[in-house]
Amino acid sequence: MEKRANEINAITSVLASRAKKEEISYVLLGDFNIPNVKDNTMVALEKNGFSVPAAIKEHPTDLGTSKHYDQIAFNLKLEKNMTIFSEKEQKAGAFNFAKSVYSEADMETYREYFPEKTIAGKTDAQILSYYMKTWRTFQMSDHLPLWVELKIDFSNQYLEKLKVDCK
């Protein structure tokens, strides 16, 4: 875990340095294998000017909904009146596709596709466990996708800035 935290710190350090030189914003997202929001790996992600919205931190991204592997972090260089993500509105989360597809109730639908060698001689409980913990992760993913609603229209703020600059 220390090596992972060092890797994350190295990435955020390089990107933060670029953001400072180029005066641009960065959005960093991916699978950081962060076990929980208090772990050193999360601390490393939020170093160097990056922040993870509270609405993202609230949502574990593994199928068991206990780990915070995936994250979306921001290092923003915007005018004070421009907010790309509103902490107040909290429009972000993880999409739990397992509630819609490949649910426990769907197992019988897919059972014919299980490799015979995997289920031969197994109890119904063991087959269900295989389906829930192994088979469906190869059909979709073993991670829940994160989403975040971003504000991208800053036309009014830009026009106001032009008015001020022209005076």
Image (cartoon, rainbow, N blue to C red):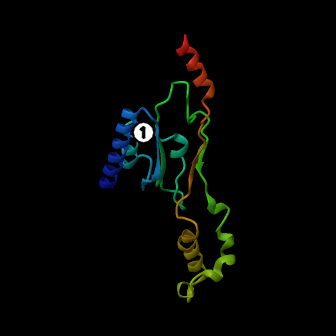
What residue type is disc 1 on? Phe
Q: Which residue is mark 1?
A: 50
Q: Position of residue 120 (x, y in %)?
A: 56, 88
Instruction: Work out which residue is located at the far front of the displayed protein and give it.
Output: 166
Q: Position of residue 103 (x, y in %)?
A: 65, 67
Q: Position of residue 160 (x, y in %)?
A: 59, 19
Q: Is residue 93 above or below residue 101?
A: above
Q: Element under label 1?
A: loop
Q: Is residue 14 above or below residue 122?
A: above
Instruction: Classify residue 58 as left or right of residue 6.
Output: right
Q: Is residue 17 above or below residue 144?
A: above
Residue at image point 55% right, 31% down: 83
Instruction: Work out which residue is located at the far top of the displayed protein and give it.
Output: 167
Q: Is residue 167 above or below residue 87?
A: above
- Which quarter of the rendered picture does the N terminus lie within? bottom left
Residue at image point 54% right, 64% down: 141
Q: Total label count? A: 1
Residue at image point 61% right, 42% down: 149
Residue at image point 50% right, 56% down: 66
Q: Residues within 10 Å of mark 1 (few under 14, many from 20)?
A: many
> Which residue is nearer to you in this view: 2 or 74?
74
Instruction: Classify residue 110 as left or right of residue 66.
Output: right
Q: Position of residue 109 (x, y in %)?
A: 69, 76
> Which residue is nearer to you in this view: 15 or 161?
161
- Which quarter of the rendered picture does the C terminus lie within? top right
